[in-house]
Amino acid sequence: MKKADNTRLDRGPGCGDRDSHPLVVVGMSGGVDSSVAAYLLKKQGYDVVGVFMNHLGSDTADVLNVARALAIPCHIIDAAKEFNARVITRYNNEVAHGLVPNPCCFCNPEVKFKLLCDFADSVGADFMATGHYCRLQDGVLKKALDDTKDQSYFLCGLTQKQLSRVIFPLGNLTKVEVRKIAKDAGLVCAEKKDSNDICFKTAVSCFALGQRAGIGGQSQRMYIIGKSRDGKVRVGTNDSPELYSKSLIAKNFNWTSGAPPAQKFSCTAKTRYRQPDQKCIVEILKDGRVSVTFEDKQRAVTPGQWVVLYDGDVCLGGGEIQCTNYNVQCTINE
C-alpha cells in the first residue's frame, strides 16, 4: 500500500502500519465533494466502497455514474425511516414549541454517521469517510484549511467512537482545488452545483430571531425580535435590545474530545454557521449544561440553534441553545 500523503490527505489512525489495503466506506451523494473524497482515497491505495443514503427518494443516477467512473461498488441504503424518526419528527416538534432547530447538527451523528458506521461494521471496513470540509488529527476534530468551506460546526455532535474511524480527505483542500481534481479525473460532477437545504423543503416553517420581517410602509427595516406569550411574532428595528444577548445556556452538549478542557475556561464560539469566532467564557454547570458568556453582545442568538466552541482551529464540541441572557425560567425550571 502507498504511504500516507499527510500533506494533502487526512487519514485514519494506523493506516501506514497495515500490510493489506484497508477497506473504507465512503458516504456518497453524487456531488463533487464526496466523489473527490472517494477518488482521493482510491488513489491513495484504499479499497473503496461507496454508500448512498436514500432518505428522500432521490435520483440515484449521479452517484451510480460516479461509482462506475471510479470503478468502485456503491450500495444504496434506505435511510427514510431513520431520517423521519430522528430528524424530521424532532425538527417539527421543536418548531411546534417555538424553537428554530439546526437539523444538520443532530442528523450527522444520529443518522448519517450512525448508518455509515453500521454499514462499515457489516462489511468489515476499517474506516469510513465523507466529503466534509474539516480535519482530524489524533482524534481531534479541527477546522478545514479553507475557512470559507469549513463544516466542523455541523459535525460538533460526533462522538469519539465515530471520530476514531473517520477520514476527511478534503480537510486540506479548497473548493477550487476539489473541482479541479474532479475535472482532471474526468468526473461528470466536476461542475455540479452544491445542494442547499433540500432535506427540509417539506418541513414545518419557522421564524428565526433576527430574520427580516417583510413589513412595508416603515421608515426602518423591521426584524423578528421574538414571540409574545400568545404565539404572535414580535418585530422591531435592528437596534432593538431583544435582538442582542450577552450570554446563553446550552443543553445536550457533546464534547468531541470526550470531555471539557476544564470546569471554567476561555475560548471562542459560534452561534450560527458562518459567524466569525466570538470570544467567550465557558462554565460547566452542575447539571451538565454549559453556560457561555460573550465578551461582546451577540445578535440573534436563537434557542434551538447550536453553539459550537473552538480553541483556535480545534472544535471542542457543541450543544443546543436553550435560552439566552440566563433568565430565571431557563436557569431554574428547565
Image (cartoon, rainbow, N blue to C red):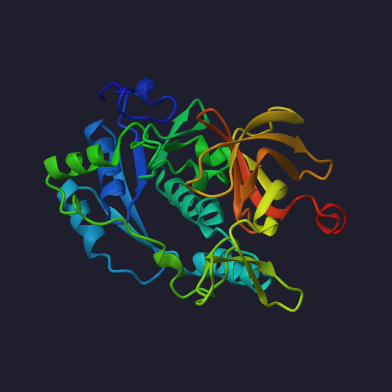
Find residue 88 and report its horizontal and vertical position in percent: 54, 69
Image-quadrant location for residue 269: top right
Q: Is residue 322 above or below residue 234?
A: above
Q: Position of residue 141 (x, y in %)?
A: 51, 34
Q: Nearer the viewer, residue 46 or 142?
A: 142
Callout count:
0
Q: Along the horizontal axis of the image, is 111 left or right of 56?
A: right
Q: Residue at x 61, y 46 (%)?
A: 307
Image position of 47 with respect to 90: above or below: above
In the image shown, does 48 or 303 lie closer to the viewer?
303
Establish if 329 lies above or below 259. Answer: below
Residue sitting at 46 percent across and 68 percent down? 200
User: Residue 270 location, x and y as percent?
Assistant: 57, 43
Residue name at image x 81 percent, y 41 percent: 285
Which residue is nearer to you in this view: 320 or 123? 320
- Looking at the image, residue 221 sits to the left or right of residue 99; the answer is left
In the rendered image, which quarter contains the C terminus?
Answer: bottom right
Left or right of 44 in this view: 286? right
Q: Quadrant of the N terminus?
A: top left
Q: Is residue 186 left or right of residue 46?
A: left
Out of 178 and 129, give the one closest to the viewer. 178
Is residue 68 placed above or below 266 in the rendered structure?
A: below
Q: Quadrant of residue 295?
A: top right
Q: Residue at x 73, y 73 (%)?
A: 228
Residue 170, quarter of the rendered image: top left
Residue 32, percent from left and from top: 26, 49
